[in-house]
Protein backbone atom coordinates (compact mmCIF):
# COMPACT_ATOMS: atom_id res chain seq x y z
CA UNK A 1 0.00 0.00 0.00
CA UNK A 2 1.43 3.33 -1.07
CA UNK A 3 1.56 6.30 1.31
CA UNK A 4 0.63 9.84 0.25
CA UNK A 5 0.50 13.06 2.22
CA UNK A 6 -2.82 14.81 2.75
CA UNK A 7 -1.58 17.71 0.61
CA UNK A 8 -0.68 15.38 -2.26
CA UNK A 9 -4.02 13.57 -1.91
CA UNK A 10 -5.88 16.88 -2.09
CA UNK A 11 -3.84 18.13 -5.02
CA UNK A 12 -3.97 14.92 -7.07
CA UNK A 13 -7.32 13.45 -5.99
CA UNK A 14 -8.62 12.69 -9.53
CA UNK A 15 -5.42 10.82 -10.38
CA UNK A 16 -5.55 8.88 -7.11
CA UNK A 17 -9.21 7.98 -7.67
CA UNK A 18 -8.40 6.56 -11.12
CA UNK A 19 -5.73 4.39 -9.52
CA UNK A 20 -8.11 3.31 -6.74
CA UNK A 21 -10.63 2.39 -9.41
CA UNK A 22 -8.01 0.01 -10.82
CA UNK A 23 -7.71 -1.64 -7.40
CA UNK A 24 -4.84 0.22 -5.69
CA UNK A 25 -4.92 1.28 -2.02
CA UNK A 26 -3.36 4.33 -0.39
CA UNK A 27 -2.65 5.41 3.16
CA UNK A 28 -3.09 9.16 3.58
CA UNK A 29 -0.86 10.78 6.17
CA UNK A 30 -0.71 14.16 7.88
CA UNK A 31 2.75 15.12 9.10
CA UNK A 32 3.79 11.49 8.63
CA UNK A 33 0.98 10.08 10.78
CA UNK A 34 -1.53 7.78 9.00
CA UNK A 35 -5.04 9.27 9.15
CA UNK A 36 -7.03 7.50 6.41
CA UNK A 37 -7.05 4.72 3.87
CA UNK A 38 -8.25 5.31 0.31
CA UNK A 39 -9.37 2.01 -1.21
CA UNK A 40 -11.97 0.58 -3.59
CA UNK A 41 -15.34 -0.42 -2.18
CA UNK A 42 -15.71 -4.13 -1.55
CA UNK A 43 -18.72 -4.52 -3.85
CA UNK A 44 -17.36 -2.25 -6.56
CA UNK A 45 -15.75 -4.98 -8.66
CA UNK A 46 -16.15 -4.26 -12.35
CA UNK A 47 -17.89 -6.80 -14.52
CA UNK A 48 -16.67 -7.77 -17.94
CA UNK A 49 -18.69 -5.94 -20.62
CA UNK A 50 -19.39 -9.19 -22.47
CA UNK A 51 -20.98 -10.77 -19.38
CA UNK A 52 -23.11 -7.65 -18.75
CA UNK A 53 -24.32 -7.71 -22.37
CA UNK A 54 -25.21 -11.39 -22.04
CA UNK A 55 -27.13 -10.70 -18.81
CA UNK A 56 -29.09 -7.94 -20.57
CA UNK A 57 -29.93 -10.28 -23.44
CA UNK A 58 -31.12 -12.93 -20.99
CA UNK A 59 -33.26 -10.34 -19.21
CA UNK A 60 -34.88 -9.19 -22.49
CA UNK A 61 -35.69 -12.72 -23.65
CA UNK A 62 -39.44 -13.26 -23.65
CA UNK A 63 -40.37 -9.69 -22.71
CA UNK A 64 -42.64 -7.85 -25.16
CA UNK A 65 -44.25 -4.41 -25.25
CA UNK A 66 -47.50 -5.82 -26.69
CA UNK A 67 -47.73 -3.09 -29.33
CA UNK A 68 -47.04 -0.16 -27.00
CA UNK A 69 -44.72 2.54 -28.23
CA UNK A 70 -41.94 4.08 -26.17
CA UNK A 71 -43.91 7.36 -26.11
CA UNK A 72 -46.96 5.56 -24.64
CA UNK A 73 -44.79 3.99 -21.95
CA UNK A 74 -43.31 7.36 -21.06
CA UNK A 75 -46.76 8.94 -20.79
CA UNK A 76 -47.98 6.03 -18.67
CA UNK A 77 -45.03 6.52 -16.31
CA UNK A 78 -45.96 10.19 -15.86
CA UNK A 79 -49.46 9.41 -14.52
Image: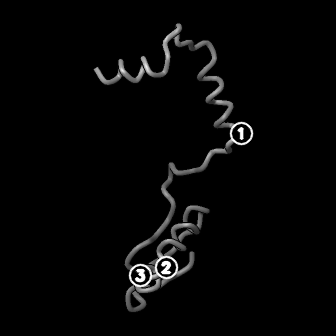
Q: Is residue 73 above or below residue 38?
A: above
Quarter containing the C terminus = top left
Mark 3 or 1, nearer chain start: 3
Q: Given the current orientation, which residue lies at the most extreme bottom position?
A: 31
User: Mark 2 highlights which residue?
Assistant: 12
User: Mark 1 highlights which residue?
Assistant: 50
Q: Position of residue 71 (x, y in %)?
A: 44, 21
Residue occupying image coordinates x 49% and y 83%: 4
Q: Position of residue 43 (x, y in %)?
A: 50, 48
Mark 2 or 1, nearer chain start: 2
Give the camera-side residue of 19 and 79: 79
Q: Quadrant of residue 28?
A: bottom left
Residue occupying image coordinates x 49% and y 12%: 68
Q: Is residue 16 above or below residue 62?
A: below
Q: Quadrant of residue 63?
A: top right
Residue occupying image coordinates x 50% and y 53%: 42
User: Mark 3 highlights which residue?
Assistant: 34
Q: Quadrant of residue 78?
A: top left
Say which element carries label 1. Answer: helix
Give the class, few, some or many, for how many residues have Cα within 10 Å of label 2's Cα (few <14, many ≥20). few
Say which element carries label 3. Answer: strand
Give the class, few, some or many, for how many residues have Cα within 10 Å of label 3's Cα (few <14, many ≥20). some
Inter-mark Cα distance, 3 to 1: 40 Å
Say which element carries label 2. Answer: loop
Amino acid sequence: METVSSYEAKTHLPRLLRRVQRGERFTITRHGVPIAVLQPLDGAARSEPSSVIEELRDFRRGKRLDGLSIRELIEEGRK
